[in-house]
Image: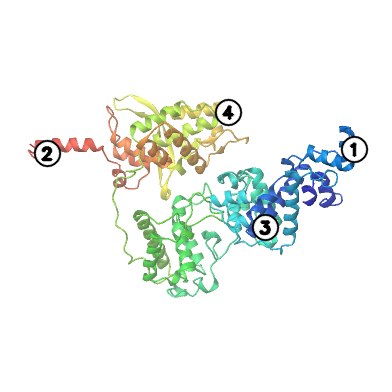
Amino acid sequence: MRALAQGLDERASWDRYLRLEGEHADLRTVRRTIAWIRDEFAAAAKREHKPGTARLILLDPDRFASAPALPSLAEFAAAQGLEDFSEAEQIEAYEAAYPAGGGGGRGGARPSRRARVIDHQLQALRWLEGLVVQDPRPSDGVAAWLNPSLAARLERAGVPTLAALVDRINGIGARWWVGVPGVGELKAARILDWLQANEQVLGLRVGLHVARPRAQLTRAALAAVMPAATAIRPYEKFLLPAELNGSAGRYRAPRERCLLLAANDHEAVGAWLASKWHSAAEGDLSSTQRSYRKEAERLLLWAILERKRALSSLSMEDATAYRSFLADPPPGWCGPRHHQRWSPMWRPLEGPLTPTALRQSLIILRSLFAFLMSQGYVMGNPFAAVTLPPSLQRPLGASRTLSFAQWDRIDALLQAHVDTEPGRRLRRGMRWLYATGLRLAEITRARCQDLEQVVYETADGSMATGWLLSVVGKGGRSRQVPVSIELVDELGDELARHGFERQVGAVGNQGIHVLARFDSERERPAPWSASGLYQAIKAFLARAADGLEGVDAQQLRKASTHWLRHSHGSHALQGRAAQAPVPIHVVQNNLGHASIGTTSMYLTTERESRLATMRRFWSEAKLTS
């Protein structure tokens, strides 16, 4: 660094001081290393509370011009024709010509700004060299080790320490820097270089998954990111301490009466989850299992980490305390929903549960302990006596339903949407969701062979052709949902466009999903994932909101895939002007509700319509003037 400060070429300084025998480094590596060293020195100065020195060490002296070279006294005398004058007279004339010269050949010119910067930098380097060497620690602030401006950007993005920085990198992966304003790919690479160079002394490791885009990582690679531990971890990564694993739980039933092979509470919860319906076709947990697992893992984590008790040792008082915990969880237990289960940034809660969510949670936990009791694992149910929050019987989707006008706007935008494969797929997905009322998981699982063409008799006695989609929904219940001919024809057009048979039900189309990704390079198109469809619809609705103001804009920005399902139920039961409402039993089948009472909760009318109807009733009953 002293050589660089004094003007030695960066490649030459690298070859002289840093190059290893037989090594070749390109100029980008050289410059990145120099930038890294400058950052180290600047951060060290900041640790010593010398921000001015930190700024100085980052300055490039070449930004400042050198002072012009002055002639020697002899050269000046020859140029001015003063050779025959005395030396004293020559010096007098020289000082008059160069007042800053300070004595000509004897004193030299006043140093340039560049020379002064170099001198100060050399002094700073000598001071830094004398500092006691320190190793970074996970709890150190990022400002103590990284480039000051870079550290400030990280701090503003909520990354105050080195441990938080590594957690963020490991938790997001390859493009972890996207959410940090002012940090791009090159700055992110410098940060990674520093962390990897200090990996051993820090005791913090950046995972191998960070080097590859998320789409290229296998499940096994993601599973390896976060080790199992007795800490805030998902159910599958949570280790029970031996003294709290439930093998000697306070309320365990006699072993000879237990119908479970589970040796501890973790395995008992696993047996309960396995007893719930599972979609063998997809190999993933069903939505029911995910909901049940979420509640069980929250309780298991809380019991061990907060209450210091085994799950099978929980009393009614513990259950009441847990209800209070869910209503006001500590910040360390909460995080955004989008952090996936493999990520170190995953948290079991987003924040306090609403009364409705809290009621659902307690009902599920009652179910868990009822199962454990029925199998002879525990003797009682600590949640049986816990008071549930009152059930607020609001209409289904009351605040999550699009108006007819809002849907018409969305449909018009879909009609004008870009004519690309992803654009047509998005249009297909949104129209199918609204037209059928299917759940997100149901539409993404639907395949061509699930569609059946049928002939039926219309109300006027004529024969017509239609389509039914076979769906396996919640609880493994099967149903057939009507699909419009236009939607099926649109799917047929897309199949033909990509070299498949236009007839949707053709043998060659078996295994192709209704929302297949025809843009992939695979011989058979891959299915569009539920998360991919969800994110695409959210992005489209956000763009649709940009041209609106007020409530409409707010509604569209909040809307999601499930809003389309709610809108189907509400719009079908209401009916449009000059259009008869759809019978409730048909809507019940479309939505896959086990009870018609659930579907009836969509039976809402607009406020003005309700008031006008009741006004007529009161008038006829002579209750109004």
Classify mark 1: residues with Cα within 10 Å, few (<14), some (14-19) or many (20+): few
Answer with left or right where residue 624 lies relative to residue 589: left
Mark found first going from the N terminus, 2 or 3? 3
Q: Which residue is mark 3?
A: 44
Amino acid on which disc 4 is placed: His
Of the two numbered discs 4 and 3 in the rendering, the one whose residue sits closer to the viewer: 3
Classify mark 4: residues with Cα within 10 Å, few (<14), some (14-19) or many (20+): few
Mark found first going from the N terminus, 4 or 2? 4
Nearer the observer, 204 or 574: 204
Q: Is residue 574 above or below residue 200?
A: above
Answer with left or right where residue 336 lies relative to residue 363: right
The disc at residue 498 is 4
Nearer the observer, 569 or 92: 92
- Asked if marks 1 and 2 touch (Cβ < 8 Å), the reply is no
Amino acid on which disc 2 is placed: Trp
Q: Quadrant of the C terminus?
A: top left
Q: Which residue is mark 2?
A: 618
The disc at residue 234 is none
State the image quarter where residue 466 is shown.
top left
**Disc 1 to disc 4, how far (Cα)?**
97 Å
